[in-house]
Image (spheres, grey):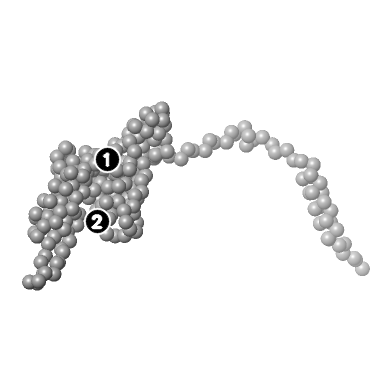
Amino acid sequence: MAKKNQLDDKVIYINRVSKAVAGGSTFSFSTMVAVGDNDGSVGIGIGQADEVVPSIQKGKAAAEKNMIKVPRLNTTIPHEIEAKHDGARVFLKPAHPGTGVIAGGAVRAVVELAGINDILSKSLGSDNSLNIARATIKALQNLRDPHLVANLRGKTLDEILSDNPYGGPDKAPEEESEQEPADPADEDAPVESTGDEESEDAAEQIDDEEEVSPVETT
């Protein structure tokens, strides 16, 4: 993998296209390439040529022209996001540091080149790699920078990230609050009985005595 601020590229998809002509058929290649600097910038592009290598080079050049800036929060994204392109839908969710990139195929290639090291993802709908890559770019493009949101709302960054369990720097998910132990004085206190309970006990005792009949002796 290339260092930060140095463009790295990954081939997402290569498709061979056949075209029928008068003298027979010709073949060409269509390639989608993702390009990123591993520091918040990523883009995708498609190149077409008669050979594989030139198509990759054209795809890389097109991706460099279409790069976008991705808001990040430490090693993950600032909030959940879902995007759709044609029949493909992609859902991205922030993850705790150390989780890694839980994604595959086109989604993994794009988020890794964007410099995102911890993320959860789910690909919904179509399994077309081209549409999944475009949906991933849309999702990353629609992310909002928490610092800008905090300034617009006049709040602190911690207040903005209060709903995100992975929002703070190196924060682990907050453990469930433990219940406060009961006061021993309350446990030792005698339980007062009400008059209704005493009357119910007396009625049950009378019913038991009536059910038991005396045994006659001869």
Nearest the viewer among 206 and 35 is: 35
Q: Quadrant of residue 195?
A: top right
Residue 104 visible somewhere in the drawing: no
Q: Quadrant of the image for the C terminus?
A: bottom right
Q: Quadrant of residue 88?
A: bottom left
Q: Earlier in the sequence, mark 1 or mark 2?
A: 1
Give the residue at mark 1: 70
Residue 42 visible somewhere in the drawing: yes
Identity, as a three-letter code, of the amino acid under mark 1: Val
Residue 216 relative to residue 131: left or right: right
Q: Residue at x 12, y 51 (%)?
A: 58
Give the residue at mark 2: 130
Residue 211 relative to residue 147: left or right: right
Q: Is residue 144 above or below residue 154?
A: below
Residue 7 relative to residue 192: left or right: left
In the image as oriented, which residue stretches furthest toward the left?
23
Question: Which label was assigned to residue 10?
Answer: none
Nearest the viewer among 168 and 12 is: 12
Identity, as a three-letter code, of the amino acid under mark 2: Leu
Instruction: Give the class, few, some or many, for how many residues have Cα within 10 Å of label 1's Cα (few <14, many ≥20).
Output: many
Q: Is residue 175 above or below residue 20?
A: above
- Residue 61 x/y as whole percent: 14, 47
Q: Is residue 183 above or below residue 107?
A: above
